[in-house]
Image (cartoon, helix red, strand yellow):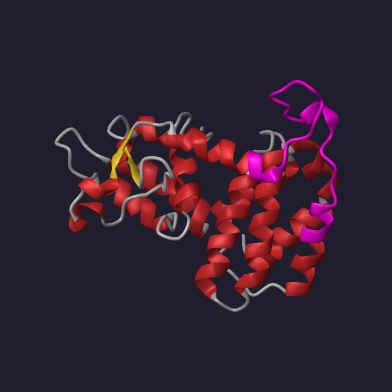
């Protein structure tokens, strides 16, 4: 499913997407669309933006027509990322930005009825990822750190999530391969979210399944999302 098809899908089902995405997911969708608009004719940047959009849409309910289309698309359609008209992307991004979060979906940790800003949502999401077991990135040799997710932590410095390392302490080859598919060098937060979040296809959390299921299943789950094979 390429970028033109994604924009058409979102436009056709905009009310459904608005109803079923949470505030942080809508914020991520807006950011991903803005990245797609900025990408222009840069294929790698477009591929990364489309990957981010797909990740958000896979958070929709299992019976969602949009989610089903994304699932079918990444399995059946060519994986190319075309150059969608910037005007269409900008119009859709502006529409999504105008959405008001439904009260039932609002997240108000203080319980006082005040809304939560997109910046606060983003910080909370990153705190969740940084809370996972990790090791200091500066303790790794350059060759050991190559191909691994590095998450910047303002308090502790860059961290490498622990699931990336095997029992011998060395980096896992399958993690490096999946990270390359997920463009982790450009979007480490998105790649970490894939690893540390639930995955319907794998029926579990990918990071917890490393070493428990065949490596090729992890690779194919990531490849299906990214390349559409």
Q: Is residue 19 left or right of residue 182?
A: right
List x then y, in percent, for residue 197.
50, 35
The correct choice, above or below, for 103 with respect to 44 in the image is: above
Residue reaching furthest front?
155
**Extent of the magenta region:** 93-120
Query: Quarter-wise, where is residue 36 in the image?
Result: bottom right
The correct choice, above or below, for 182 with respect to 46 in the image is: above
Residue 97 on the magenta span: yes
- Nearest the camera: 12 or 105? 105
| Residue at x 82% of width, y 65% of height | 91
The correct choice, above or below, for 227 with respect to 208 in the image is: below
Q: Does the magenta stretch mainly form a helix, a strand or a loop?
A: loop
Residue reaching furthest bottom?
41
Position of the N terminus by quadrant: bottom right
List x then y, in percent, for residue 168.
14, 36
Q: Is residue 174 left or right of residue 199?
A: left
| Residue at x 74% of width, y 66% of height | 89
For the image, the number of numbered tags is: 0
| Residue at x 68% of width, y 51% of height | 29
- Nearest the camera: 201 or 114? 114
| Residue at x 78% of width, y 34% of height | 115
List x then y, in percent, for residue 207.
38, 35
Residue reaching furthest top?
111
Residue 46 on the magenta span: no
Residue 77 can be seen, yes or no: no
Residue 24 can be seen, yes or no: yes
List x then y, in percent, for residue 31.
66, 56
Q: Is residue 204 left or right of residue 141?
A: right
């Amino acid at each position: 499913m390429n970028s033109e098809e994604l924009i058409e899908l979102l436009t056709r089902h905009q009310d459904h997407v608005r109803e079923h995405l949470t505030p942080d997911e809508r914020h991520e969708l807006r950011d991903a669309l803005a990245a797609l608009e900025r990408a222009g004719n840069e294929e790698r940047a477009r591929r990364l933006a489309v990957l981010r959009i797909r990740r958000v849409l896979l958070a929709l309910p299992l019976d969602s027509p949009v989610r089903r289309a994304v699932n079918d698309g990444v399995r059946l359609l060519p994986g190319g990322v075309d150059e969608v008209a910037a005007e269409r992307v900008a119009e859709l991004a502006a529409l999504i930005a105008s959405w008001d979060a439904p009260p039932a979906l609002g997240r108000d940790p203080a319980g006082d009825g005040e809304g939560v800003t997109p910046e606060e949502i983003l910080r909370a999401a990153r705190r969740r990822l940084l809370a996972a077991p990790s090791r200091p990135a500066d303790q790794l040799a350059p060759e050991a750190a190559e191909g691994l997710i590095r998450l910047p932590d303002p308090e502790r410095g860059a961290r490498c999530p622990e699931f990336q390392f095997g029992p011998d302490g060395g980096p896992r080859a399958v993690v490096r391969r999946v990270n390359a598919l997920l463009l982790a060098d450009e979007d480490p937060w998105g790649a970490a979210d894939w690893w540390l979040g639930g995955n319907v296809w794998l029926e579990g959390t990918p990071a917890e399944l490393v070493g428990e299921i065949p490596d090729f299943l992890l690779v194919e789950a990531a490849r299906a999302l990214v390349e559409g094979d």
